[in-house]
Amino acid sequence: MNPVNLRDFETVAKDKLDPVLYDYFAGGAQDEITVRANEAAFRRLSLVPRILRGAGPPRLDLTLFGQPSAMPVLLAPTAFHRLAWDEGEVATARAARDADVVMIAAMLSTVTVEEIAATGAKLWFQLYLQPDLAFTESLVRRAAAAGCRALVVTADSPALGRNERGDRNGFHDLPPGIVCANMGGNGSVRQVELSPALSWRHLDWLREITDLPVLVKGVLHPADAVLAVEHGAAGVIVSNHGGRQLDTAPAAVDRLPLIAEAVRGRVPVLLDGGVRRGTDVLKALALGATAVAVGRPVLWGLAASGSEGVARVLSLLRTELANALTLCGAATPAALTRDQVTP
Ligand SMILES: Cc1cc2nc3c(=O)[nH]c(=O)nc-3n(C[C@H](O)[C@H](O)[C@H](O)COP(=O)(O)O)c2cc1C
Ligand SMILES: CCCCCCC(=O)C(=O)O
């Protein structure tokens, strides 16, 4: 099949991947209600075009924390890329570099952050704050030294969501030869600690030990968005972890207007979860997001054909986004208005 959209890439990837690994990537928590809700919520929203505005050709570029990006789309942090393609995150990063977009490198990458950075891609670094703060600090220093320009603290994971596909498949560990390359020791996933003891105090600590902008990922409640800003977050990412943590959590895009309103423009609001079309990107931008991030589609591109597949996923999304923007009568995402999205 010649994939012509992001959903086609899932079909291609599903054919290629070991079904256990496909389940790991595609799956979510428990009944996967939130996984489905993320995409369904975008489908329920309509875009209202404006006409005869003489908008001219679309411009998608923006600057985020001093980093120019060709479009308001980032690669969401996803773990374990070597499960999809032997070169792992290095292949993903090459495509991000060539598309001139930011890749949020996952702490649980299967090649080191230094190897990812050596591709020349624009990187941010995602952190699961480890209760061993000395270790966390060493990771932050490594990410900064490698050239990561922001930190993304995943705050929706005080424990791991209950993934029943993984339980059914008995998939609870990485296969031999694939490791959490940043973790030191034997690189086993079992040494990663998700801790319910983490609190805003840890965010304060993180801000003291680094000058990098810190974004909080996994915000669904407006009060938490306000707390994040009060604790010095440079941005918030509205996200339910692609439906992999708390099942029945609301769709990310449904929470976006509330959160954008609470943040009141003080910091950028990003969103991930269910973005599969250029029109989805536009809807999120019109509802107050500065940019969106995509998770699974990047993995499908990677599994389909490595760097080339990820490049194609990003290019399709860019083409769709430019087309949708023009059809909405806007030259830039900023020219879209809130009333152009309706339930
Ligand atoms: C296979 C997989 C692994 C993920 N690993 C991480 C991770 O290590 N850290 C993290 O913050 N989020 C992780 N996520 C969540 C993504 O960052 C993102 O929130 C989610 O994939 C967005 O939804 P989408 O897949 O519908 O685009 C992962 C998601 C998937 C599908
Ligand atoms: C105990 C470590 C689990 C990491 C899971 C990575 C992730 O965020 C995801 O699969 O989702």
Image (cartoon, helix red, strand yellow):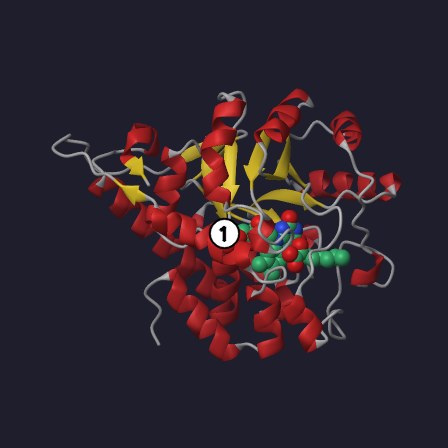
Residue at screen point 43% across, 72% down: 11
- Residue 222 higher or lower than 194, as above or below: above
Instruction: Please tell me whether mark 1 sits on a helix, a strand or a loop.
Output: helix
Numbered marks: total: 1
Does residue 118 appear in the picture of this structure?
A: no
Classify residue 60 as left or right of residue 145: left
**Where ligand 1 lies, by image quadrant?**
bottom right
Residue 135 % position (x, y): 85, 44
Residue at screen point 27% across, 45% down: 324
**Closer to the camera, 180 or 248?**
248
Classify residue 102 as left or right of residue 342: right
Residue at screen point 48% across, 72% down: 13
On-image quarter of the C terminus = top left
Classify residue 51 as left or right of residue 130: left
On-image quarter of the N terminus = bottom left
Quarter of the image for residue 115 reads: bottom right
**Closer to the camera, 161 or 331?**
161
Does residue 36 appear in the picture of this structure?
A: yes
Give the residue pinned by disc 1.
Answer: 96
Residue 116 % position (x, y): 63, 53
